[in-house]
Image (spheres, helix red, strand yellow):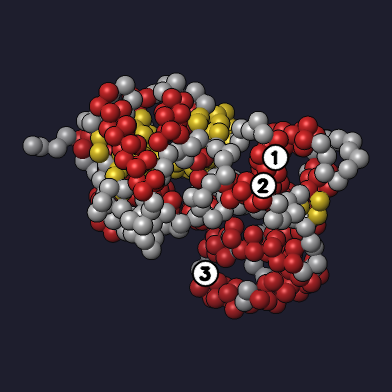
Amino acid sequence: MKKNKTDEIPEFVEKYLSTKTSGDYSIECKCEKKFDLIIVVPAIQEFENVKNLLTSLKTNKYLNKTLIVFVVNNLKSSSEEVKNDNRKLLKYLRIESAKGDINVGLIDASSPGKELPAKTGGVGLARKIGMDNSLKFFDYSSANKKIIACLDADCVVDKNYISEIIDKFNSGKLLAAYTCFEHPLPEKTENKKAIINYEIFLRYYVLGLKYARSPFAIHTIGSTILIDYESYIKVGGMNTRKAGEDFYFMEKLAKTVKIIEIDTTTVYPSTRSSWRVPFGTGQRVRRFLSHEHEEYLLYSPKSFKILKKWLSIFNSEQALSSQEYLIKAGRIDKALYEFLKLNQFSKNWDTIIRNSKSRGQIQLQKKLWFDGFKTLKLINYLRDNGYPDENMFDAVGELFDMTNVKFKIERKNPIPAIEKQIKFLEKLREIS
């Protein structure tokens, strides 16, 4: 049968797919059409939660332009409980796909012989499998943006989630973005405190980076990631990390394209404690509830002041020698100077200067070298070398003052009542 234009995959997409490392998987889908938006959802033991996610997606417009792909996955060594739940989910998704009221696809990375490999199997590989295979289901004959969205199986979305993504990407010609997110606050007091604590931590860090004018002042929540297909291929696709895949993907993306926040729709991630990944929301909730650590601490605001001074020098249009940069760093702070020395700044910078043929290349190399990961490493180094963590609410209050945010709450105790903690979180949600 002769292919029509809708079936034709661009050559550079075919080339990427021929070299991808996500394994021999494919999307099962009853629909014969192609799409503008494909939502990729990794799922392991998520039978009940997937129903809630689909219910929230069914309230959206543009469902005819959208395919939702679930990557149902486990390892060969996964428990029978996990495998049984996944079997139920596969059956449910096939029924939903056959109904035709919403375009549902699935990738079976769960059944015997199809399990994810033990060495690399995890959320990163599951996302990659779904995102790679999505490239075969776009309507390349359309002038509309072809967008991949990431969600998690245990979240829900606003009723304008799909329409805002499609409209914003097309009207603004966006290359990459992320949506707003808000963790629903649980009924149980301790669980509520855990979520407030974790979300304040996330938003405080991004606000600190914004204050410092870091190009990596973005949220890196897996269920909020949005990217057009060309940018996805440009950065080499999703990584296969078992955890933190979202941070490293967005950090890599931020080096290459501009990432925009779509602040007109919201994703609501799960607030449950979870075994699925070694860090993130589930792990932080579990840690908070176990009382293993002092949780009401944040990076010192002074660290962001140091970062801001360093970036104002390093990211300027000037290209100084490595020694000049180190001298200026030493004047800002001794720990900053030591950090640069430990990370072989002189050697790396001299190589950058030697290999760059224009100012534009030098500016790009600055961003590539002092990236989001190295930024985080610096903040951690400053914490361990002179600027220890501070009381959460003192730190937030000081950062508010630094960013000229008008917000004052009287509190008698270092850790205020939960009602006041919520007020801190609400203000951070407004501005970060």
Q: Earlier in the sequence, mark 3 or mark 2?
A: 2
User: What separation in Å lies between label 3 and label 2 (alpha carbons)?
Assistant: 51 Å
Looking at the picture, which amino acid does disc 2 mark?
Leu
Look at the picture and state if 358 lies above or below 66: below
Judging depth in this view, the residue of 282 and 304 nearest the camera is 282
Give the residue pinned by disc 3: 356
Residue at 57% across / 65% down in the picture?
369
Asked if the residues shown at circle 3 and circle 2 are in contact, with their CB atoms under 8 angstroms apart, the answer is no
Q: Earlier in the sequence, mark 2 or mark 1?
A: 1
Give the residue pinned by disc 1: 190
Asked if the residues shown at circle 2 and circle 1 are in contact, with their CB atoms under 8 angstroms apart, the answer is yes
Judging depth in this view, the residue of 420 and 178 nearest the camera is 420
- Side of 199 where 166 appears, left or right: left
Looking at the picture, which amino acid does disc 3 mark?
Ser
Q: Secondary structure at mark 3?
A: loop
In x, y percent, where is residue 359? 57, 63
In x, y percent, where is residue 329? 75, 69
Look at the picture and state if 115 lies above or below 179: below
- Side of 402 where 276 appears, left or right: left
Give the residue pinned by disc 2: 289
In x, y percent, where is residue 24? 25, 53
- Front label number (3 vs 2): 2
Specify the quadrant of the image occupied by residue 193: top right
